[in-house]
Amino acid sequence: MIIGASSLAGSIYQLKHEVDSIELYIPKMGLYNGSKLQDDEFKKVYDELSTSSALTSMHAPYFADVDTYPDDLLVDTTIMDDKQFGLMEESINLANKLDTRVVVIHPGKIHQDRYKSFAKMLDNLKSLASTASDYGVMLGLENKEGTDTNNLCCDADELLQAVEEVNSDNLGVTFDIGHANLTCGGDNQKLRYFANRISDYVVHMHLHDNYGVWTEDYDGDLHQAPGKCMIDFSILEDIKGYRGIYNLEVFSIDDVVAGKKIINNLKV
């Protein structure tokens, strides 16, 4: 089992002593000045990782309507312009340089018409998958939380429809069990069905806990350590043959340590 954690939880130095893999959260690592990548800052990350045996995954820029997310790095995969395609190709290129296992990407938002938005997103995902193929990089399309009704690809069927219609060897699924729990309303039986439905397509995982209900804070997407709320993480045992990273998407080293105890007890 390969256990990873997001760079949101701590420094590379801290994480490489706790986990096997580090997910580089590109929009929030101080690598950019506005929308321009700072080569010297990336070199610092590259050099620090080169002295470690830690594997990497990567989280590409995405859309977030919160004050803490940099406006210059917003990417909505439903509506993309040259700047946004450039940002995404830059992440894919960095992943190639770091020999990163998977680059996580978000589905798009719904703009008035769901079907037109989905179709536009598919076109953009096809372009991104083609770019990923050129660089030899795997993309993992993440399921989003159904408590935000403007999200595409919250339920398993729509997520799989997107991946199947793109039909690329360089696009699979990032299974975010916390988001799926919110979509399933905290019902572990529905969550188990969700996991089994997508199991053949999973190339990466995001692990965190919540109570399966909407709240004013981030639509219920609390990103607590596994074991702190109510998700039955043994559901992950149903995803047979998975050999990727079990990435803890939490916000502190303490939560990484707590989450590891839960995940290490899984029979996978």
Image (cartoon, grey):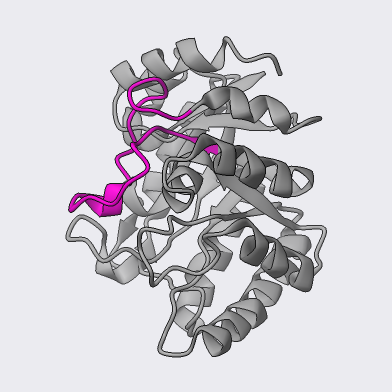
Q: Position of residue 147 (x, y in %)?
A: 36, 58
Q: Position of residue 81 (x, y in %)?
A: 48, 85
* In the image, residue 225 lies in the stretch drawn in magenta: yes
Residue segment shown in magenta: 206-231
Relative side of 169 to 91, left or right: right
Compared with residue 174, is residue 263 higher up or lower down, i.e. above or below?
A: above
Compared with residue 7, is residue 168 higher up or lower down, i.e. above or below?
A: below
The C terminus - image quarter: top right
Q: Position of residue 231 (x, y in %)?
A: 45, 30
The N terminus - image quarter: top right
Residue 35 visible in the displayed image: no
Relative side of 67 to 60, left or right: left
Which residue corresponds to the image point at 57% horizontal and 11% vertical from the top-left?
264
How many numbered marks are there? Answer: 0
Q: Nearer the viewer, residue 246 or 36?
A: 246
Relative side of 5 to 11, left or right: right
Q: Main secondary structure of the magenta part?
A: loop
Which residue corresponds to the image point at 51% horizontal and 26% vertical from the top-left?
232
Q: Nearer the viewer, residue 166 or 135?
A: 166
Based on the displayed image, in which of its 4 quarters is residue 252 positioned? Answer: top left
Residue 264 visible in the displayed image: yes
Q: Position of residue 165 (x, y in %)?
A: 77, 73
Compared with residue 29, is residue 261 higher up or lower down, i.e. above or below?
A: above
* In the image, residue 102 lies in the stretch drawn in magenta: no
Which residue corresponds to the image point at 63% horizontal and 66% vertical from the top-left?
158
